[in-house]
């Protein structure tokens, strides 16, 4: 035996064949004595559960140090004691310690979450009872905390062993066994998805063609012309309204002063509020008479010289003939707008195009979803590749200083 032989042995790694991996896992777990460790953990936890129940019994039977308290306070204390004991007992009875080492991690995390929830649910009762039965209450709380610490400590031991990686290997071995069938199923699925995608794309082309035909139809061209005409009419209405407002805004100050001495105060108020609507509703153009009388009373309105001159000038412009023309023009524009609107509503070409565009949008959305589904299927096909699975098993085994042959 050479002097450096021990160095050679130290470098040697365990080797296994792919078909021996499952046997190696079994041996590895046996060498870790996991069954014995889990049995000891369960025994310790069950012992602490029983101790906690005994402490609950002591809490239930404990008497008050000071019995000279009002009955109402005693009832409150008893109600909280019963509530606290009931919830803790239900929690203890619900603890199920797993036999499988892989489930210990999940059990420990769940136990911590359950304890956090239990603490919130019993918080009120705990603080009430602490005023009367602190010794017995704290003993229960400490025992439950011991249980949590025990579970966390055991979970950390399990995690150090990296045993969840063994379960990952087992899953890979199952995937390998099923890979041929799964691969065939996935390829068939991809083929069906491809056919559905092609059908959707054909539908997209059909809808696109239909939209193009509808947009080139005579009725749609007429619809667009009607829309343009409507825009022109609305612009003309706005211009006419602006002209009316401009005329009467110059007279606003004079109107406000004159209406107090006028017999037509209500009519003047209408023109002050909305001159356009007032003019349209003024059947006999009563405002023309008001303007004439207001012109004669300008001196009494105490307007500044410039304002009085502008008011006089504006009244001079607003002859009855001009007001009549403005009113008739505006009426005519509103009639045109109404007629245009009715014709537009009767033209269904735009509605048909809108309907087709909605279908097109939905079809495009379905195409995108189908393309994503095919992509996911392709990823699954890659993942169930037998050679890839073997490579993944070999990579995980390296973490346990094990080399796999023929991978």
Image: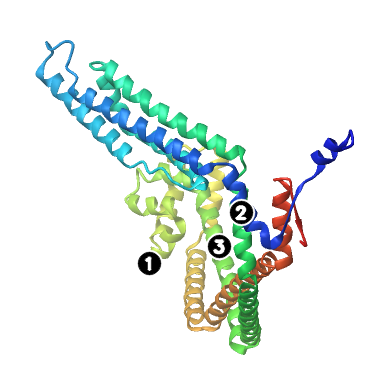
Q: Residue at x 66, y 83 (%)?
A: 205
Q: CA distance from mark 3 to mark 1?
A: 22 Å
Q: Quadrant of the C terminus?
A: bottom right
Regarding mark 1 in the picture, which secondary structure is present there?
loop
Q: Quadrant of the N terminus?
A: top right
How is the model colour-coded?
rainbow
Where is mark 2, residue-wise?
A: 168
Query: Which sits earlier in the primary sequence, circle 2 or circle 1?
Result: 2
Where is mark 3, residue-wise?
A: 238
Measuring from the top left, give residue 196's x and y in whole percent.
60, 81
Q: In the image, which is nearer the foreground, mark 2 or mark 1?
A: 2
360 or 145: nearer the viewer: 145
With 293 as the anchor, is 178 left or right in this view?
A: right
Measuring from the top left, give residue 129's x and y in whole percent.
25, 21
Regarding mark 2 in the picture, which secondary structure is present there?
helix
Regarding mark 3 in the picture, which secondary structure is present there?
helix
With 361 as the anchor, is 293 left or right in this view?
A: left
338 or 206: nearer the viewer: 206
Q: Residue at x 83, y 36 (%)?
A: 6
Q: Residue at x 37, y 46 (%)?
A: 259
Measuring from the top left, give residue 175's x and y in whole percent.
62, 65
Where is mark 1, residue-wise?
A: 283
Q: Residue at x 47, y 40 (%)?
A: 38
Crowding at dot 3, Cα within 10 Å, few <14 / some 14-19 / many 20+, comes out as few
Q: Residue furthest front?
A: 1
Image quadrant where residue 367 sits: bottom right
Q: In the rendered view, would you say 218 is above or below 40?
A: below
375 or 390: nearer the viewer: 390
Q: In the image, which is nearer the foreground, mark 2 or mark 3?
A: 2
Confirm or deny contact between disc 2 and disc 3 (CB under 8 A).
no
Q: In the rendered view, would you say 75 is above or below 39?
A: above
């Amino acid at each position: 035996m050479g002097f450096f032989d021990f160095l050679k042995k130290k470098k040697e790694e365990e080797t296994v064949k792919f078909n021996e991996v499952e046997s190696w896992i079994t041996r590895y777990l046996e060498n870790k004595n996991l069954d014995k460790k889990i049995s000891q953990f369960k025994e310790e936890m069950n012992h602490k559960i029983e101790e906690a129940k005994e402490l609950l019994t002591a809490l239930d039977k404990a008497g008050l140090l000071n019995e000279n308290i009002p009955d109402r306070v005693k009832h409150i204390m008893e109600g909280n004691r019963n509530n606290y004991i009931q919830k803790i007992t239900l929690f203890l009875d619900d603890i199920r310690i797993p036999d499988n080492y892989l489930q210990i991690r999940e059990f420990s995390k769940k136990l911590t979450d359950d304890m956090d929830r239990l603490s919130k649910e019993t918080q009120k009762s705990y603080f009430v009872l602490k005023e009367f039965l602190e010794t017995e209450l704290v003993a229960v709380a400490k025992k439950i905390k011991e249980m949590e610490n025990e579970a966390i400590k055991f979970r950390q031991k399990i995690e150090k062993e990296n045993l969840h990686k063994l379960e990952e290997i087992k899953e890979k071995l199952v995937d390998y066994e099923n890979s041929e069938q799964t691969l065939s199923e996935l390829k068939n699925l991809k083929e069906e998805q491809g056919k559905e995608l092609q059908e959707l794309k054909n539908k997209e082309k059909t809808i696109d063609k239909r939209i193009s035909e509808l947009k080139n139809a005579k009725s749609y061209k007429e619809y667009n012309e009607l829309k343009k005409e409507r825009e022109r009419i609305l612009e003309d209405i706005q211009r006419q309204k602006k002209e009316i407002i401009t005329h009467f805004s110059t007279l606003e100050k004079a109107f406000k002063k004159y209406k107090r001495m006028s017999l037509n105060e209500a009519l003047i108020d209408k023109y002050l509020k909305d001159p356009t609507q007032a003019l349209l509703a003024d059947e006999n153009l009563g405002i023309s008479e008001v303007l004439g009388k207001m012109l004669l009373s300008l001196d009494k309105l105490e307007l500044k010289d410039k304002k009085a001159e502008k008011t006089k000038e504006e009244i001079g412009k607003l002859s009855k003939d001009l007001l009549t023309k403005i009113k008739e023009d505006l009426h005519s524009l509103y009639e045109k707008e109404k007629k245009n609107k009715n014709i537009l509503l009767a033209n269904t070409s735009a509605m048909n195009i809108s309907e087709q565009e909605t279908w097109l949008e939905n079809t495009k959305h379905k195409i995108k979803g189908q393309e994503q589904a095919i992509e996911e299927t392709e990823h699954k096909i890659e993942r169930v590749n037998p050679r890839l699975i073997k490579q993944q098993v070999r990579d995980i085994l390296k973490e346990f200083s094990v080399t796999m042959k023929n991978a």
